[in-house]
Amino acid sequence: MDTQTALFQQHRPRLFGLAYRMLGSPSDAEDVLHDAWLRWHAQDTTVLDDPEAWLVTVTTRLALDRLRRAKTEREHYTGPWLPEPLVADADHPEAELERGETLTLSFLLLLERLSPEERAAFLLYEVFDYSHAEVAAILGIAEDACRQRVHRAKTRLREGRPRFSVDAPTKQRMLQRFMTAMKTPDLESLRALFAEDAISIADGGGVVRAVLRPLQGADRLARLYMQIGTRFYSHPEVHFSVATLNGEPVLLAWAQETLVSATWIECEGDRITATLALRHPAKLARLAAVTKSRLPASLH
C-alpha cells in the first residue's frame, strides 16, 4: 500500500463516522468517501501541512452538499423518514467511530432538527472534538458564526432529548416483552407496555403500509400494535430476532426469508416511551443482506 492510500485508510473510520452522522445513510456516506478519495488521489499530498484537516474539510463539505440535496428530497418523502442503521463490520467498525451514543437511531433522527450547517458545526465540535476555530476553518466561516451555529444546535437538540437514558440490557428486556406481546396480541397487555405519552414513528416510504404521521398516546399505540400483531406478527411463518445495531438492541421481524421490520424503542422505567419502526423495503433489504448471515440458522 502506497503512503497516500495508507494515510487515507488511517483516517477512514473518522471520515466515515462523520459522513454517516451527517447523512444518516451508510451508502450515502460511502459515496462521500469515494468522492473524497478521488480528490485525495488527485491532490499533491506532499504540500499538505495537515492531511487529516484536509480530508475532514473535504469530507465535511461533500457531505454538506449531499445533505442539502437530501433535505429537499425528504420534504417530498411519503410519511416519516428514519435513518438507515449501520451494521458493524470490518469496513465500519462502530467502536472506532468516536462516541458510540451519537450513533443511536434516536440521536440521528434528532439531528434532523438542525440545518445542514448547524449539523456539521455541532458534530465537528461536540462529537469529533475540534475547536471552534478549527470548525470555522473547515466550514469556511467566521469563528463567531461557528459558535452561534453550535449554540443553536445544542438548544434545538436539548429540547428533543429523551428525559431518561436507559441502558442496552434494560431496552433488550423491554424488547423481549414487546415481542411476546406482539406474538400473542392482547390489548391490555400492550397498553401496559406504553407510557401515557408514548409515540410511534414508522418509515414505510409510501411503499408499504405504515402510519403516515407520528402516532401518540398509550391507547392509540396499543390499538395500532394490536392490529399489527393480529394481522401479521402472530402468523406462524413470522419470527423475531434481537440484534444490536448502532449500539442499541433492535427487534427484527422476518416473514420466512424476508426482513419486514426493524424496531427500536426508547424507555422510561418499565414503560416504552417511543417506537421507531423501519419498514421501507429497500432499506430493509440492504440491512437484511448483511445481518442474515450473522443470525442463528433457526431464525431464518
Image (cartoon, rainbow, N blue to C red):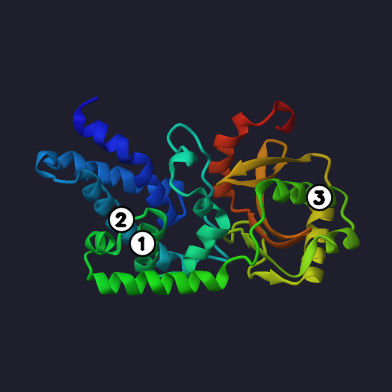
Q: Tell me the residue that label 2 is attached to.
A: 60
Q: What residue appears at the point 50 percent right and 54 percent down from the top-left corner?
A: 102
Q: What residue appears at the point 53 percent right and 59 percent down from the top-left corner?
A: 107
Q: Amino acid at mark 1?
A: Ala
Q: Are marks 3 and 2 in contact (CB under 8 Å)?
A: no
Q: Earlier in the sequence, mark 1 or mark 2?
A: 2
Q: Tell me the residue that label 3 is attached to.
A: 177
What secondary structure is found at the residue carrying circle 2?
A: helix
Can you tell which quarter of the image residue 216 is in?
Answer: bottom right
Q: Earlier in the sequence, mark 3 or mark 1?
A: 1
Q: Are marks 1 and 2 in contact (CB under 8 Å)?
A: yes
Q: Amino acid at mark 2?
A: Thr
Q: Nearer the viewer, residue 259 or 60?
A: 60
Instruction: Return the residue found at the far left.
Output: 47
Q: Amino acid at mark 3?
A: Arg
The x and y percentages for residue 50 are 19, 46
Q: Nearer the viewer, residue 179 or 209?
A: 179
- The local crowd at label 1, few if under 14, some if 14 to 19, many if 20 or more residues have their Cα within 10 Å, is many
Label 3 to label 2: alpha-carbon separation: 41 Å
Q: Is residue 138 above or below residue 283?
A: below
What secondary structure is found at the residue carrying circle 3?
A: helix
Specify whether residue 18 is in view: yes
The x and y percentages for residue 220 are 78, 70
Horizontal side, residue 182 vs residue 82: left or right: right
Q: Tell me the residue that label 1 is attached to.
A: 120
What secondary structure is found at the residue carrying circle 1?
A: helix
Q: Earlier in the sequence, mark 3 or mark 2?
A: 2
